[in-house]
Image (tube, rainbow, N blue to C red):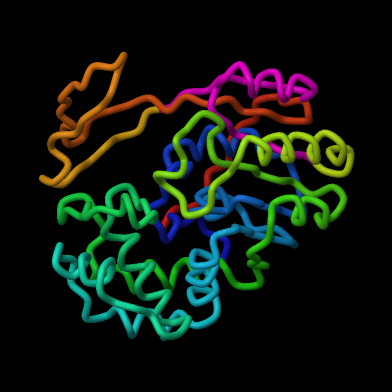
Amino acid sequence: MNQAVNSPFRYAGGKFYARKLILEYVPQHLSYVEPFAGGASIFFAKDKVKVNWLNDIDEDLVNVYLFIRDYPEKLIDALKNEIATKERHSFYKNIFIPSNPLERAIRWYYLNRTSYSGIMNMKNCYWGYGDKYSMRPENWGRNILRTSHKLQNVRLTQLDFEEVIQQVEDNSFLFIDPPYFNADQDKFYNHSFSRECHYRLSNILKYSSHKFKFLLTYDNSPEIQELYSWAKLIHEKEWNYTINRTDDQKRTKEIKDGIKKETVAKKGSRYKGREIFITNFSFAKKRLLLLTWI
């Protein structure tokens, strides 16, 4: 199967809304690698190639990917009678204790599909499902089956990014989407990414980039601009995305200049995603051949 499909997950910091922009930068390649797969929106949006490798340090995330790839029927059967309710979300978050890999996959998938923005850090994993804009449980099975087809023969690992980059084949293309440099990422992810990790990433890319091409996406900050001053291109990019919310997210609080303000997150509000795209190869904008979406 080589059709474009949506990621099976909601994922904080994912690139769902930036897919078309990113695909314009993808060069011809036969080996594709994501060291920070997360929701893997770009992999699912592009053509599969001869070699495909998705990696993430999050053991629970990789466990769900393995079940979707290798045992989709087991996961589908376990979820077929689920309903999306705040009480069920609370059960999986606070009460249910998985006793095997399948139960871990069930818990993770349910919470991901019903939590606000797909945030899986349990301290900030809040109910965030709404019938009008969330994927309904009766459609979860079809979603799992579609993505299972695309994951066939895809390598799935749970390694440190440096180990992955050291192992990639020559002439591979790497799409690299690490946690933001300035974000309070501990609120969203279960594995922290320290300042030292950002420096490690820059160093290994600098000294290994003669072997492969990469596109790296980051928050636009002076530190990152300086850290990647050696790269071939740094392009500032922005895109539109929409925030939908349940009634539980009507009112949110933000801290700005030391003053607490109440803001209303309106359903369907449009926002701008702003990042920098960093490459180690020259880029000429190409005509994008979109795949057939299902």
Horizontal and vertical percent position of residue 174: 71, 46
Give the residue furthest to the left: 247
Can you tell which quarter of the image residue 52 is in? bottom right
Viewer-proximal residue, 29 or 258?
Answer: 258
Q: Is residue 255 magenta?
A: no
Q: Is residue 238 magenta?
A: yes
Q: Along the horizontal axis of the image, is 268 left or right of 122?
A: left
Horizontal and vertical percent position of residue 170: 87, 50
Horizontal and vertical percent position of residue 196: 68, 38
Is 85 located above or below residue 293 in the figure? below
Name which residue lies at 42% across and 50% down: 11
What stretch of residues is rendered in magenta? Answer: 213-239
What is the number of callouts on the image?
0
Horizontal and vertical percent position of residue 48: 64, 58
Name which residue lies at 21% across and 55% down: 127
Viewer-proximal residue, 199 or 84?
Answer: 199
Give the residue furthest to the top: 257
Q: Along the horizontal axis of the image, is 54 left or right of 144?
A: right
Viewer-proximal residue, 173 or 248?
Answer: 248
Is 95 located above or below residue 125 in the figure? below
Name which residue lies at 65% across and 25% down: 285
| Viewport quadrant of the N terminus | bottom right
Q: Along the horizontal axis of the image, is 270 left or right of 61?
A: left
Viewer-proximal residue, 293 or 87?
Answer: 87
Can you tell which quarter of the image residue 76 is in? bottom left
Is 192 located above or below residue 18 in the figure? below
| Viewport quadrant of the C terminus | bottom left
Name which residue lies at 57% across and 61% down: 2
